[in-house]
Image (cartoon, coloured by chain):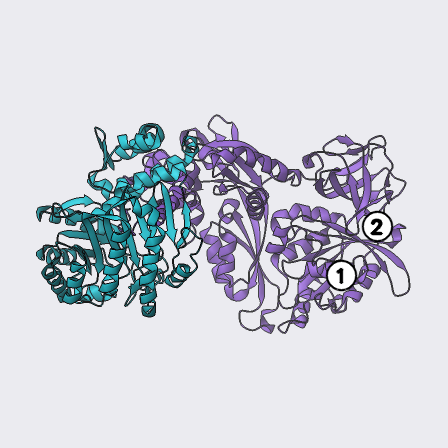
Chain colours: A purple, B cyan
């Protein structure tokens, strides 16, 4: 295909603003897929994605578009993950495109994450086509949202397309705008091959499939190819494109989007952002923007039943086949036995991974409270990275602790500014900047949307922050975050002792000013969560050997069935079986039976 | 074979809010056909009954005392026709205070009944109302007097303690009133909130507080002390009796003896096999007609428990007896010593002060009597985790 007829684009949209429905309409209207063939929302293929209404793994689809004047185009739609945890993947998907559809719900307005992606796209010189979707909704306010887009992003009113993907309105106009407004790729077909990997997927037969955008040269033949960042060489098995099902093609032309079947066994060798080139005639340099993805959130994942350790290992290795950003290594806990320390891009990533492990692999898991990675400068001058609170060295050996900070953007109607301020400052956040996205004077009191910028320790937004932000703004606020840098902090480790024995899995690292309060809350939560035992069980929270909170769980006094049921033994049996089952689900720590929920108590510190 | 016979009468004038037994109000019209079905049920066991000495016949419910006395007597006669009912056999029924008159009691005594147990529950009018009981405290006194006058040699009272908000004093007042009547037998049950009952629902909705287990424990300990001083012997977790008046029938359950279960939803245990009858009275009655060719037309379900279950059942029932159990009988039954099978769990419970071992005798300690389920759940969890318990009998 002649490069001038190729249009590569993606869709930038907030969750639920209608990205998937619009993608479906584009595939349908271009005849790529008939309405009948199409399972609703083809691009999101994982069950979990549908349930959570988000796109986790990017996909790509090629369409043939015939303009009203008969001119034919090749459209490549690159789907982008819709969650803040996957910001880097989004940036690589954007890098593979010349343009983007900015889809905004006409009843909602632009959200923080979408705005962050818009800026990202603008920085990469993408042509943006603003689409106001869901104009069919009775409470849609297209005029107001159009003005917001004009103000915030700088669109002119006549650029904005009004659409209802659900009803098929505006779809033709969007297709024609893609052909007319988005520039074609401008690669050099004769230059050495440079193809950008924007996603990858493991296929049992073809090895890792690299989803690529060819920037220069052409991909064809059987000549060995090379991954420039990881320096891995492979023999390509197949080239092709998704239409939207996988279809092999003799070659990928300059400017096109498609896949390369690499035959590689490990997605980690085929990283998003890497450049594919010819092994023999390599490009002089890789495409810009590659970054090794580093996990930001860490948690221990343990099988509830220690017999399932091998199954868990197997399941993790299978998941990691398709998820280069999931890292894991074995660890053991005195309380929980053998498990894995896992690193995730963010909390949603953690949630998705643990749900998939349980759902797709039938495992029963215990996930410890998530932690960020701290950097500890020892008195000896050595530096250690700590992602598990129980491993924090003794305070006497610590010179300084550094913690990661993030910049967060919150967009909210102005009437919630007070609540957001309070939430952020109680979590040690620092206010940086505020900007009205709409002129206050033209809006009803408190309705004008405002962008708030803060800097805040990452560790403070891991647990419940997003939920509380939503809760304190009646669901209106949206959030975007990205990592800033490590800063020194006055942090301490709070240890929990159950019946005099320290329980490693319950340790937490916290700001020293909050240690006493959090210790007290933790201890009282544990008192609720740990059932009464055959003896009194003291629960203590301690910082460096000094007890800061203590409660006692009194020994159970009565657990007996009184009645005699006329010789019916089955009722007692059922009850005993339930109690015996309950005992098996407990983790024995010393001689205390601790239920799984107790290990999540750390997550509840911020509930109140 | 020595056999106990349990006969279930699933009818009540009113179903109490805490009750989750297989019993029904407003099915009066079924009483007549039900009486015939009971006899058909007994006849369906003629092979077993014909080879057995019956040492007890116990009518439970429901409210057997409100079932026509004539039909109860007729059922006992049927049992006598089919089995060798021993001369000193215990023939008992449960009744509500005030509803079984002196005439009825005389008729029952004449028909061979020698033991009656009244569901007194409390001597406090407000507590009785809370429990949906329709009788007054005075009716209890009158019923006990009537039973004695009718010639019943063993009169028992059932009491319930641990009601939400009940004080220890309030409970002891009821207990004292009961003891003042010198019943030969006393059963004291802690109120159990069962799911699916009106009481369970009220607790779930927060309209009634959950009974406090600690205060129930205190009441239990006070009960043991009080009844002991009053000359009653504590022989099972919830049961006390004057010497010689223990419930022979109920001991069958706790001793692991054989018993037939007759009536809707009744359970039986014969020769290691467990039986469970059709639960609803209407379906149960219908089975009487369809019985041609079916050996046990009233049985809905029967099975021989797997080894782990059998061991757990063995342990759970016998351990309820205050005297405990001779562990050598375990070896006779399961062909392994108790220590090789559940020794670790027993040791743990001994360590917690829940169990005591005295030579061959294994029994709950006073504290353990309140924690019977803790002990048994540990034993069961241990059994389930042991492969040896899953192996069938060699």
Q: Which quadrant would residue B41 be assigned to in this image? A: bottom left
Q: Which quadrant would residue A192 be assigned to in this image? A: top right
Element class at badge 1: loop
Mark sitting earlier along the chain (2/1): 1
Disc 2 residue crowd, few under 14, some 14–19, many 20+, Cα 10 Å: many
Q: Residue A452 carries which label?
A: none
Q: Which quadrant would residue B236 be assigned to in this image? A: top left
Disc 1 residue crowd, few under 14, some 14–19, many 20+, Cα 10 Å: few
Q: Do labels 2 and 1 share a chain?
A: yes
> Residue at label 2?
A185
Looking at this view, is B205 or A266 the one in front? B205
Disc 2 versus disc 1: distance between alpha carbons? 33 Å
Q: Where is residue B346 in the image (x, y as percent from the top left)?
A: 30, 33
Q: Total number of numbered labels?
A: 2
Looking at this view, is A236 or B133 the one in front? B133
Q: Position of residue A198 (x, y in %)?
A: 73, 44
Of discs 2 and 1, which sits in the foreground? Answer: 1
Is A487 above or below relative to A109? above
In the picture, which quadrant includes the C terminus of chain B? top left
In the picture, which quadrant includes the N terminus of chain B? top left
* Most distant residue in the top direction: A380
Work out whether residue B131 can be spotted. Answer: no
Q: Position of residue A503 (x, y in %)?
A: 39, 36
Q: Which chain letter matches label 1?
A: A
Looking at this view, is B16 or B168 the one in front? B16
Is A140 above or below relative to B52? below
Element class at badge 2: loop
> Residue at label 1?
A36
Image side of residue B317 versus residue A351, left or right: left
Q: Position of residue A387 (x, y in %)?
A: 51, 36
Q: Which chain letter matches label 2?
A: A
């Amino acid at each position: 295909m002649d490069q001038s007829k190729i249009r590569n684009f993606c869709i930038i949209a907030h969750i639920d603003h209608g990205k998937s429905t619009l993608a479906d309409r584009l595939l349908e209207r271009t005849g790529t897929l008939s309405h009948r063939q199409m399972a609703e929302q083809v691009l999101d293929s994982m069950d979990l994605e549908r349930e959570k209404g988000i796109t986790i793994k990017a996909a790509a689809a090629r369409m043939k578009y015939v303009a009203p004047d008969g001119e034919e185009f090749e459209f490549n739609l690159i789907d982008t993950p819709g969650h803040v945890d996957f910001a880097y993947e989004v940036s690589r998907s954007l890098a593979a495109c010349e343009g983007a559809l900015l889809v905004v719900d006409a009843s909602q307005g632009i959200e923080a994450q979408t705005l962050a992606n818009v800026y990202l796209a603008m920085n990469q010189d993408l042509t943006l086509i603003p689409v106001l979707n869901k104009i069919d909704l009775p409470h849609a306010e297209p005029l107001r949202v159009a003005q917001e887009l004009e103000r915030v992003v700088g669109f002119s009113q006549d650029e904005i397309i009004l659409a209802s993907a659900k009803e098929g309105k505006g779809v033709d106009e969007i297709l024609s705008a893609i052909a007319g407004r988005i520039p074609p790729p401008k690669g050099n077909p004769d230059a050495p091959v440079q193809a950008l990997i924007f996603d990858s997927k493991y296929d049992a037969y073809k090895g890792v499939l690299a989803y690529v955008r060819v920037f220069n040269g052409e991909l064809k033949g059987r000549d060995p190819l090379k991954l420039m960042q990881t320096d891995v060489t492979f023999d390509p098995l197949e080239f092709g494109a998704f239409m939207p099902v996988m279809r092999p093609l003799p070659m990928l032309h300059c400017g096109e989007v498609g896949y390369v079947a690499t035959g590689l066994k490990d997605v980690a060798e085929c990283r998003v952002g890497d450049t594919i080139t010819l092994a023999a005639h390599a490009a002089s340099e890789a495409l810009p923007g590659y970054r090794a993805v580093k996990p930001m959130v860490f948690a221990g994942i343990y099988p509830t039943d220690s017999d399932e350790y091998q199954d868990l290992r197997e399941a993790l290795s299978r998941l990691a086949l398709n998820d280069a950003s999931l890292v894991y290594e074995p660890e053991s806990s005195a309380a929980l036995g053998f498990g894995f320390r896992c690193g995730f891009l963010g909390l949603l990533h953690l949630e998705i991974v643990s749900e998939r492990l349980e759902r797709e692999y039938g495992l029963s898991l215990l996930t410890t409270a998530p932690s960020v990675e701290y950097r500890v400068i020892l008195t000896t001058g050595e530096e250690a990275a700590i992602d598990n609170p129980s491993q924090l060295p003794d305070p006497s050996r610590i010179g300084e602790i550094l913690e990661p900070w993030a910049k967060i953007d919150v967009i909210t109607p102005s009437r919630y500014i007070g609540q957001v301020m309070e939430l952020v400052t109680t979590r040690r956040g620092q206010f940086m900047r505020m900007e009205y996205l709409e002129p206050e004077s033209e809006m009803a009191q408190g309705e004008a949307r405002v962008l708030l910028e803060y800097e805040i320790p990452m560790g403070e937004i891991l647990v419940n922050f997003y939920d509380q932000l939503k809760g304190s703004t009646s669901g209106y606020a949206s959030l975007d975050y990205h990592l800033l840098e490590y800063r020194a902090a006055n942090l301490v480790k709070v240890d929990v002792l159950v019946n005099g024995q320290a329980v490693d899995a319950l340790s937490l690292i916290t700001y020293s000013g909050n240690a006493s309060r959090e210790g007290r809350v933790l201890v009282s939560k544990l008192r609720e969560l740990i059932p009464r035992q055959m003896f009194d069980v003291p629960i203590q929270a301690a910082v460096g050997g000094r007890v800061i909170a203590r409660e006692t769980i009194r020994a159970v006094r009565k657990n007996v069935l009184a009645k005699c049921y006329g010789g019916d033994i089955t009722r007692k049996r059922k009850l005993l079986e339930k109690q015996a089952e309950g005992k098996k689900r407990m983790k024995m720590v010393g001689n205390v039976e601790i239920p799984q929920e107790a290990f999540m108590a750390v997550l509840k510190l911020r509930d109140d | 074979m020595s056999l106990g016979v349990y006969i279930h009468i699933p009818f009540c004038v009113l179903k109490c809010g805490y009750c989750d037994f297989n019993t029904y109000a407003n099915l009066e019209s079924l009483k007549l056909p039900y009486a015939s079905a009971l006899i058909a049920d007994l006849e369906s066991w003629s092979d077993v009954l014909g080879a057995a000495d019956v040492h007890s016949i116990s009518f439970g419910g429901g409210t057997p005392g409100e079932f026509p006395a004539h039909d109860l007597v007729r059922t006992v006669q049927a049992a006598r026709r089919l089995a060798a009912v021993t001369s000193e056999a215990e023939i008992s029924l449960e009744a509500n205070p005030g509803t079984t008159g002196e005439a009825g009691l005389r008729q029952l005594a004449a028909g061979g009944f020698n033991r009656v147990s009244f569901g007194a529950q409390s001597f406090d009018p407000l507590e009785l109302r809370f429990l949906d009981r329709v009788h007054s405290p005075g009716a209890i006194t009158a019923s006990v007097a009537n039973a004695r006058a009718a010639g019943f040699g063993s009169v028992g009272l059932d009491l319930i303690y641990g009601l939400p908000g009940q004080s220890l004093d309030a409970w002891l007042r009821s207990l004292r009133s009961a003891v003042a009547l010198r019943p030969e037998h006393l059963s004291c049950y802690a109120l159990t909130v069962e799911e699916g009952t009106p009481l369970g629902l009220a607790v779930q909705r927060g309209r009634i507080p959950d009974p406090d287990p600690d205060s129930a424990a205190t009441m239990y300990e006070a009960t043991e002390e009080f009844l002991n001083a009053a000359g009653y012997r504590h022989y099972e977790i919830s049961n006390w009796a004057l010497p010689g008046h223990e419930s022979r029938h109920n001991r069958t359950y706790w001793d692991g003896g054989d018993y037939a279960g007759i009536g809707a939803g009744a359970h039986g245990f014969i020769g290691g096999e467990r039986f469970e009858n059709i639960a609803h009275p209407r379906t149960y009655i219908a089975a009487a007609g369809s019985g041609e060719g079916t050996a046990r037309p009233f049985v809905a379900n029967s099975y021989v428990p797997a080894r782990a279950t059998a061991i757990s059942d063995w342990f759970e029932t016998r351990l309820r007896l205050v005297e405990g159990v001779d562990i050598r009988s375990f070896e006779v039954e399961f062909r392994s010593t108790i220590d090789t099978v559940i020794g670790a769990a027993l040791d743990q419970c001994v360590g917690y002060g829940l169990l005591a071992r005295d030579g061959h005798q294994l029994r709950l300690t006073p504290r353990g009597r309140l924690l019977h389920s803790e002990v048994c759940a540990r034993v069961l969890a241990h059994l389930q985790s042991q492969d040896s318990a899953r192996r069938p009998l060699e």
